[in-house]
Image (tube, rainbow, N blue to C red):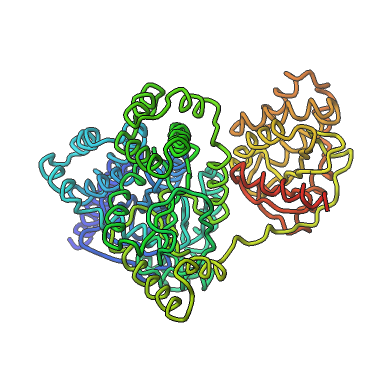
């Protein structure tokens, strides 16, 4: 009888287990990546190096040995790209091995990212993880349609009660969760998106899935070692992050902790006023230098705050405008040119009148709009039209933008209050706190004998300037290095790059732009630096060098362009197809790859980079000066101009 009972019990247990597994498949990867049921009740891994809690959107089991935490947002194209890698991980590892945690990190220059993040967090709070991931899928599928109407539609499709959703969204209830994630991200050193932590190991950007898998596999082994040593399954993540996560530099971390408001910088920067437009007296005790532009919604949002501050502080406050048209706002530069021409015709009042009308009509920046504004302001339309079309005032606009780059004022609006940084459309209290602190310092200077007119200049004397360009000792190229530009150019840009690296692809248009501007005055040289985690990069480099051998410089750069246009198709078969299309001798091409003919040359380039301390790509050494990463064209131009000045000495 006991034996029969045991058998029945075994069968029932087996069936129950099968039902559980079936349930996981129905709610998990069996449905193409929706989440399994989250653990009931609140829980928190606040003591992990990258804290996660039951309030976060989660896919997978809390006891999964590997946790992927992604700081991301819905408008970022690179975040969209990384989704494919994350979906592959979910499918291959399943919810019992892998947990995915979402942290909202909307970037300030993506106007729709924050509203989308708040809407997504609202969906999760009202209807749980499954609803969040469905909304998440809809948002990424419609990145150019992130608006309130669609948020409501996607929320309903995800099973959320529309009335509740509208109510919570109107009250902005779950904006606090987004802000909490942002604060955490900044403390962890997150600067862009996507930014991923795998059990605390950092992966920056939209990397290929192989990069993620390599780390996941290593972490599975580490997790097993923790389990074998007695660590409980629900503590593996906490212990793994403590071991793997490398915190930002202590000084940077301390500075973040000291910041009383988001975006504020305790240090003082040397920010010259120059001949820029200003409101308020030149001898004001406090000066706000504003880097801004007319198409940015956040710049418009900060305008009423600045107007109120000027009223509240009167003659004690001065506002200085610096143009910072962002590259992805196509109408920002024409608007800046309009305002500059208004200043030329009507002085400071003309500028600020134009400034006001542009912000009042943000988004209406076509030529017919500018004509209407010119007539309203009493401007000479023919001169305005010419100034916009011929970019008459572009030099001063570019000078402002270059100053912004030097000061690391990458987004807008970006303010310096007597040299102290404050970024974003902050509440008026954030401004007043800094202004009051700087006012007290300025009044102390005046009391000590500094004239009011000299206060700002005196403060700037001790202000920080941009660090000097890093020097790198890289030998001159030889005939064995592909190049384009002037054969005898005295300014040489040695580009350490990798055909599979997406950031390397980004600087290619910049190199073409520089060659178009400087012509034979510069030479761009290719140096191979295939990164170890890019599986196809090394063979692509060797293939390119064989094309160089067969077809010379012209052939190399044609092949080079083809590889960058097809970064996701760099298999051996792809490389052979590209070479054949160029008319290469395919027997020699295949033999070169089979025999490693160019392996030594590729490795020598990488060794030159390593000896110079270059470990990442892209890295461009201009006459011994390093420009690291996919920087704006202006950054390269500054170093080129520095090199020109050195040659004249």
User: In the figure, residue 461 lies in which quadrant?
Assistant: bottom right
Between residue 570 and residue 380, name the one nearer to us: 380
Q: Position of residue 392 (x, y in %)?
A: 55, 32
User: In the figure, residue 306 lies in which quadrant?
Assistant: bottom left
Q: Quadrant of the C terminus?
A: bottom right
Q: Position of residue 262 (x, y in %)?
A: 37, 62
Between residue 465 and residue 606, name the one nearer to us: 465
* Residue at 20% from the left image edge and 36% from the top image edge: 152
Q: Position of residue 115 (x, y in %)?
A: 28, 44
Q: Quadrant of the N terminus?
A: bottom left
Between residue 22 and residue 133, name the one nearer to us: 133
Between residue 506 and residue 544, name the one nearer to us: 506
* Residue at 71% from the left image edge and 55% from the top image edge: 614
Q: Is residue 264 visible?
A: yes
Q: Position of residue 186 (x, y in %)?
A: 42, 61
Left or right: 471 as drawn, with respect to 136: right
In the image, residue 444 sits, relative to residue 13, either above or below, namely below
In the image, residue 581 sits, relative to residue 9, either above or below, namely above
Left or right: 451 as drawn, with respect to 498: left
Q: Is residue 96 visible?
A: no
Count of numbered marks:
0
């Amino acid at each position: 009888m006991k034996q029969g009972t045991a058998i029945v019990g075994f069968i029932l247990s087996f069936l129950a287990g099968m039902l559980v597994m079936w349930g996981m498949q129905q709610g998990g990867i069996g449905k193409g990546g929706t989440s399994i049921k989250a653990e009931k009740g609140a829980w928190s891994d606040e003591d992990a190096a990258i804290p996660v809690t039951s309030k976060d959107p989660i896919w997978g089991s809390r006891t999964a040995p590997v946790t992927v935490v992604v700081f991301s947002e819905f408008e970022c194209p690179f975040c969209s790209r990384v989704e494919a890698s994350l979906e592959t991980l979910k499918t291959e590892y399943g919810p019992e091995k892998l947990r995915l945690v979402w942290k909202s990190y909307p970037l300030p220059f993506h106007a729709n990212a924050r509203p989308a993040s708040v809407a997504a967090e609202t969906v999760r709070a009202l209807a749980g993880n499954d609803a969040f991931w469905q909304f998440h899928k809809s948002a990424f599928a419609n990145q150019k349609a992130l608006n309130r109407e669609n948020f409501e539609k996607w929320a309903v499709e995800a099973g959320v009660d529309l009335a509740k959703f509208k109510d919570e969204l109107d009250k902005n209830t779950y904006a606090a969760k987004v802000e909490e994630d942002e604060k955490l991200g900044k403390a962890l050193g997150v600067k862009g998106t996507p930014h991923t932590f795998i059990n605390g190991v950092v992966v920056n950007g939209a990397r290929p899935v192989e990069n993620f898998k390599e780390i996941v596999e290593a972490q599975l082994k580490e997790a097993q070692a923790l389990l074998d040593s007695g660590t409980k399954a629900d503590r593996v993540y906490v212990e793994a992050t403590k071991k793997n996560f490398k915190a930002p530099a202590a000084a940077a971390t301390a500075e973040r902790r000291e910041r009383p408001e988001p975006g504020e910088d305790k240090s003082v920067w040397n920010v010259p006023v120059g001949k820029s437009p200003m409101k308020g007296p030149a001898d004001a005790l406090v000066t706000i230098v504003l880097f801004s532009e007319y198409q940015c919604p956040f710049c418009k949002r900060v305008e009423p705050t600045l107007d109120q501050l000027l009223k509240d502080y009167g003659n004690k406050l001065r506002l200085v405008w610096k143009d910072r048209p962002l590259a992805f706002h196509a109408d920002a530069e024409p608007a800046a040119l309009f305002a500059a021409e208004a200043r030329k015709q009507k002085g400071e009042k003309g500028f600020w009148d134009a400034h006001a009308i542009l912000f009042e009509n943000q988004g209406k920046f076509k030529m017919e709009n500018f004509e209407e504004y010119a007539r309203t302001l009493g401007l000479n339309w023919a001169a305005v039209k010419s100034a916009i079309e011929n970019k008459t005032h572009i030099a001063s606009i570019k000078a402002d933008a270059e100053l912004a780059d030097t000061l690391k004022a990458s987004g807008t609006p970006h303010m310096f209050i007597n040299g102290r940084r404050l970024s974003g459309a902050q509440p008026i209290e954030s401004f007043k706190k800094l202004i009051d602190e700087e006012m007290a310092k300025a009044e102390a200077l005046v009391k000590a004998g500094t004239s009011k007119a000299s206060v700002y200049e005196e403060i700037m004397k001790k202000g920080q300037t941009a660090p000097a360009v890093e020097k790198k000792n890289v030998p001159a190229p030889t005939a064995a290095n592909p190049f384009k530009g002037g054969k005898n150019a005295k300014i040489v840009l040695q580009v350490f790059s990798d055909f599979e690296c997406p950031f390397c692809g980004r600087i290619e248009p910049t190199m073409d732009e520089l060659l178009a501007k400087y012509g034979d005055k510069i030479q761009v040289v290719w140096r191979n630096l295939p990164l170890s985690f890019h599986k196809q990069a090394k063979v692509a480099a060797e293939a390119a060098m064989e094309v160089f051998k067969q077809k010379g410089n012209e052939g190399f750069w044609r092949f080079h362009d083809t590889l960058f246009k097809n970064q996701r198709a760099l298999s051996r078969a792809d490389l052979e197809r590209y070479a054949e299309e160029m008319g290469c001798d395919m027997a020699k091409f295949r033999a070169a790859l089979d025999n490693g003919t160019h392996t030594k040359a590729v490795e020598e380039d990488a060794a030159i980079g390593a000896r110079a301390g270059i470990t990442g790509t892209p890295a461009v050494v201009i006459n011994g000066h390093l420009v690291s990463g996919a920087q704006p064209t202006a950054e390269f131009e500054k170093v080129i101009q520095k090199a020109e000045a050195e040659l004249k000495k």
